[in-house]
Image (spheres, rainbow, N blue to C red):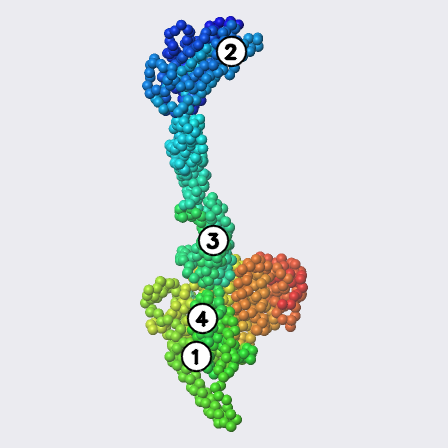
């Protein structure tokens, strides 16, 4: 290798092409250059010192790097001479904000050993020095002003090539200088006899560069010279807010350390590449935070960028408190499948969840109760319906609103009343969309219910022979309490003999009690629906005698007592007589009515609940006692609807002052009447006026002070039941018929509870209104015997409606509620056969005979077995075996509750159902043969006609049609139907064999 130091230059260039870093040079971002020799294209203009002299000094040389980018280098190589002291000084470098600077040197340095023939002066180091000044001192140079930074030596001077050549290696050395205080400085390189080439000199300082961390910007920051960190506060980027003040520390190495705190993007903005950007359309962000914007939930939208919320689509809503992330919702649809189960005056309502809950889970139900008029008993609407909110004392269990379950029990409703329940499903947005709310409605009619028992009885005052009691009205009266029945008896007598009192109010004084005796007492309330259950038994004791009788004075005392008893008896007798007189003359309604029973039977004649108007000496007093006198000017007569015994029956309107106009029926007493006729005519009003029950025709009042004399009652649009049924043959469902029968039985129960025996119960005396409600009417007294066209004279002379009357009433005029029950059985038969005439055209005499022999009417066509059984029970010969009206009502209620039981018809059961002739006692021969049956047929008007029908067996008879009957002359529809049904029944009877009833 060439050992001339000059050849260094060439070697250097060669070397540069190998080691110069790739262009362009990128420095770390935290380094700020103050000087970069490589960046200078032209002469650097550094000065060397001494500038003039006999020896070679630092020389500035131009070259190119591997990219042919020109560079400037300095070199010196005076290794052959002694005492070298060659200085190279940079230009003045302004310090800027740097406190500490770095000097990066890239250089080559020849290994002295690689230079042959050098005189022992060759060095392998050079010195780096600096001088701080506040201004540029130009070419002024003083060696001693410079301070040494370091002596720079090469790490490795040469590198061996594969070919065995030794090439120069580029060394890089970095030195720190600081703290600097003056405005600028110079660097100087002192060569003391080395062969060195300065390829590049870079002077820089370090800074923490501008950065964005946690959505806060941190500016360029120059670190301190010392080891302490610089605390820097960050600034939140646009559209963000500080959550916690952002801070960072800038280290001396220009590194950001320990980020603390952060900023969050505002609502409507999300973080994207260290910035807060608006949410895109269709997205929203409702809260401060660095979450992404969310897609609009179902049924909502956002048309604009930067939305905080998504708006709801039409007919969808967001409730207050609904999170923005929740879908928009709507009110639920109506509840479904509402089922009502009525139990007297309460109803259980059940329903299913709505098909559409509106997309919410907070569905609750609310039940609105309305009391409606203008709805028929079977639930159908009779036209205009007027509803009003239910009274506040209607009870809802668990409650009426905010129900989470699909059931509610509604109690304390009025008996026999139409109610509509509106069941609404509500959710959190129902209130926002009142027009979208839907409900399911169910209409019910409550049953009749008796009052609940009296539970609280108090003893007010006790003496030796009397006790004063008071009690609280029953919790659920279920109607207007007409009176209370007080039953009491001596504890020891065990109810074998008891006394019954009736009281209008809630207190009573029991007189005539034994002293020092324990009594038991029960109270029950009575409404139009009858008696409620009795109270629990209440015990009380009368006070003991206050003195004892000595044996000596006993005789005297006995006499005194006898005298006192005699006086008391006399007083009582007088009192009773005066009382009776007063009752009649003053027409005062007795507040308490006393009945005495021994062994359960009437013991002493007493005043009855129902007051017979004939007991009044002056019947017009009775009528004013029980009936309201109407002014004739309040009555408008429209048309004649029927004919009564005493005159026409008209329909019309009654308008009383400050009351609504109502439709009424007006019975008139035709002119030229006798006193007796007037009395009898008005007697019906006196009786009717004592009743107050939904199944008893209601008296509105009478007109007696002007002519014509009138009785005004509620108007029953469908007239009498028998003709109504005939007009609507086979048009009603079983339940509708049973409903009508229940009404009649309920009215009859009321009458029997009142102690009133009707005596002429028949379909013709039942009236039907537009709602199919049946009401008992016809309360004429003598009329039972006189005016009923059905009534016939008996052997004893009285007039009796034979076909409807119980045998004992026909035989010896024993009219009781039990004989009314017989008549009820006949009405039942009339209803089920749609107004057929009982016993058809049989003569009264034949009827009496057949019934007496034990034969009974057969079941009407398609009659439910249970109803036929009820008829047979009503027709028990022994009257005590007949059902009470209370039982009849309850049997019919059960049927209404369980309509399926109506499907089993009497004709299809094995019960022998002979034409007319059903056995009710074993004394009567059974009807097993065709001959027997024909004997039974002997009473029929068509008996002879049947001789023209050729029949060979029961089978052929059973196939007989109404057409066949027409051929033999039975043309009336009723008997035709009965004969056909009876022939069928006979067929079943002969096949199954006779079964005694
Ligand atoms: P009566 O004298 O009670 O038997 O009545 C004779 C007829 O008048 C009855 O058969 C009915 O057709 C008619 N009638 C009686 N009362 C009323 C009423 N309250 N409403 C409608 N029609 C009635």
Considering only vertical position in the picture, is 96 above or below 794? above
Q: Nearer the viewer, mark 2 or mark 4?
A: 2
Give the class, few, some or many, for how many residues have Cα within 10 Å of label 1's Cα (few <14, many ≥20): few
x 49%, y 73%: residue: 523
- On-image quarter of the C terminus: bottom right
Q: Nearer the viewer, residue 761 or 901?
A: 901
SS label for mark 2: loop
Question: Could you tell me how far apart the alpha carbons at marks 2 and 4 are, in whole angstroms?
Answer: 130 Å
Label 3 C-beta lies within 8 Å of the nearest ligand 1 atom: no
Image position, residue 746 (x, y; %): 49, 66
Q: Earlier in the sequence, mark 4 or mark 3?
A: 3
Q: Identify residue for label 4.
A: 472
Image position, residue 32 (x, y; %): 40, 22
SS label for mark 3: loop
Q: Identify residue for label 1.
A: 615
Question: Could you tell me how far apart the alpha carbons at marks 2 and 3 are, in whole angstroms?
Answer: 101 Å
Considering only vertical position in the picture, is 310 above or below 643? above
Q: Identify residue for label 3.
A: 403
């Amino acid at each position: 290798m060439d050992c001339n130091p000059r050849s260094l230059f060439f070697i250097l260039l060669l070397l540069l092409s190998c080691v110069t870093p790739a262009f362009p040079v990128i420095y770390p971002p935290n380094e700020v250059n103050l000087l970069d020799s490589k960046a200078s294209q032209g002469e650097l203009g550094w000065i060397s010192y001494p500038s003039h002299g006999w020896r070679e000094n630092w020389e500035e040389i131009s070259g190119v790097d591997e990219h042919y980018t020109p560079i400037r280098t300095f070199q010196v190589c005076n290794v052959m001479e002694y005492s070298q002291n060659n200085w190279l000084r940079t230009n003045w470098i302004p310090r800027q904000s740097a406190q500490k600077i770095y000097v990066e040197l890239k250089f080559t340095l020849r290994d002295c050993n690689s230079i042959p023939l050098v005189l022992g002066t060759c060095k392998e180091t050079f010195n780096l020095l600096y001088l701080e000044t506040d201004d540029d001192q130009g070419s002024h140079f003083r060696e001693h002003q410079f301070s040494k930074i370091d002596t720079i030596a090469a790490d490795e001077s040469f590198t061996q090539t594969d070919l065995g050549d030794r090439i120069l290696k580029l060394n890089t050395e970095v030195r720190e200088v600081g703290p600097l205080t003056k405005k600028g400085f110079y660097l100087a390189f002192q060569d003391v006899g080395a062969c060195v080439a300065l390829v590049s000199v870079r002077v820089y300082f370090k800074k923490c560069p501008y950065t964005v961390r946690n959505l806060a910007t941190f500016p360029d920051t120059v670190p301190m010279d010392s080891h302490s960190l610089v605390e820097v506060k960050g600034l939140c980027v646009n559209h963000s807010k500080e959550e916690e003040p952002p801070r960072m520390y800038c280290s001396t190495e220009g590194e950001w350390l320990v980020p603390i705190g952060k900023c969050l993007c505002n609502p409507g903005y999300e973080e994207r590449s260290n910035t807060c950007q608006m949410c895109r359309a269709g997205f929203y962000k409702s809260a401060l935070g660095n979450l992404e914007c969310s897609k609009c939930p179902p049924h909502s939208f956002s048309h604009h960028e930067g939305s905080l919320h998504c708006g709801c689509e039409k007919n969808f809503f967001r409730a207050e408190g609904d999170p923005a992330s929740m879908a928009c919702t709507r009110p639920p649809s109506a509840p479904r499948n509402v089922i009502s189960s009525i139990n007297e005056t309460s109803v259980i309502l059940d329903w299913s969840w709505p098909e559409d809950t509106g997309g919410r889970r907070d569905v609750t139900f609310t039940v609105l109760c309305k009391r409606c008029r203008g709805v028929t008993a079977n639930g159908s609407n009779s036209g205009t319906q007027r509803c009003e909110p239910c009274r506040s004392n209607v009870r809802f269990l668990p409650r009426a609103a905010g129900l989470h379950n699909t059931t509610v029990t509604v109690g304390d409703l009025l008996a026999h009343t139409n109610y509509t329940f509106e069941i609404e499903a509500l959710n959190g947005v129902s209130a926002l969309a009142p027009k979208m709310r839907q409900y399911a409605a169910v209409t019910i009619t409550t049953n009749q219910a008796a009052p609940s028992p009296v539970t609280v009885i108090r003893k007010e005052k006790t003496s030796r022979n009397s006790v004063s009691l008071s009690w609280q009205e029953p919790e659920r009266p279920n109607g207007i309490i007409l009176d209370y029945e007080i039953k009491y008896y001596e504890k020891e007598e065990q109810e074998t003999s008891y006394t019954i009192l009736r009281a209008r109010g809630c207190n009573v004084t029991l007189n005539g009690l034994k002293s020092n005796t324990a009594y038991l007492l029960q109270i029950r309330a009575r409404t139009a629906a009858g008696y409620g259950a009795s109270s629990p038994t209440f015990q009380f004791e009368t006070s003991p005698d206050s003195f004892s009788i000595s044996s000596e004075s006993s005789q005297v005392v006995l006499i005194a007592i006898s005298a006192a008893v005699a006086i008391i008896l006399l007083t009582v007798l007088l009192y009773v007589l005066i009382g009776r007189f007063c009752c009649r003359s003053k027409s005062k309604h007795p507040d308490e009515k006393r009945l005495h029973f021994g062994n359960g039977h009437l013991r002493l004649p007493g005043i009855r609940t129902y007051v017979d108007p004939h007991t009044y000496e002056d019947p017009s007093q009775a009528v004013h006692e029980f009936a309201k006198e109407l002014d004739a000017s309040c009555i408008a007569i429209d048309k004649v609807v029927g004919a009564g015994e005493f005159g026409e029956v008209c329909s019309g309107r009654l308008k009383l002052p400050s009351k609504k106009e109502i439709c009424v029926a007006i019975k008139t007493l035709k002119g030229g009447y006798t006193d007796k006729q007037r009395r009898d005519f008005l007697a019906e009003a006196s009786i009717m006026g004592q009743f107050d029950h939904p199944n008893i025709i209601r008296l509105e009042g009478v007109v007696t002070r002007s002519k014509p004399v009138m009785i005004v009652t509620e108007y029953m649009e469908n007239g009498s039941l028998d003709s109504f049924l005939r007009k609507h043959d086979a048009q009603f469902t079983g339940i509708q018929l049973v409903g009508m029968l229940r009404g009649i039985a309920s009215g009859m129960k009321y009458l029997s509870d009142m102690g009133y025996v009707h005596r002429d119960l028949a379909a013709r005396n039942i009236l039907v209104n537009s709602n199919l409600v049946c009401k008992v009417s016809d309360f004429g007294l003598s009329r039972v015997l006189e005016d009923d066209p059905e009534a016939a004279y008996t052997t004893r002379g009285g007039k009796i409606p034979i076909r409807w009357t119980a045998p004992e009433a026909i035989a010896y005029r024993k009219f009781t509620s039990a004989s009314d029950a017989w008549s009820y059985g006949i009405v039942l038969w009339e209803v089920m056969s749609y107004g057929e005439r009982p016993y058809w055209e049989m003569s009264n005499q034949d009827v009496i005979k057949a019934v007496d022999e034990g034969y009974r009417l057969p079941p009407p066509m398609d009659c439910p077995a249970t109803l036929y059984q009820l008829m047979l029970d009503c027709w028990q010969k022994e009257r005590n075996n007949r059902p009470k009206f209370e039982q009849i009502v309850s049997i019919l209620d059960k049927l209404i509750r369980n309509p399926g039981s109506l499907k089993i018809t009497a004709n299809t059961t094995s019960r022998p159902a002979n034409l007319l002739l059903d056995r009710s006692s074993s004394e009567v021969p059974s009807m097993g043969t065709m001959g027997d049956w024909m004997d039974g047929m002997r009473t029929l008007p068509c008996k002879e006609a049947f001789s023209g029908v050729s029949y060979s067996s029961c089978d052929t008879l059973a196939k007989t049609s109404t057409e066949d009957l027409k051929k033999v002359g039975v043309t009336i529809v009723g008997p035709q139907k009965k004969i056909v049904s009876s022939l069928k029944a006979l067929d079943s009877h002969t096949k199954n064999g006779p079964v005694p009833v």
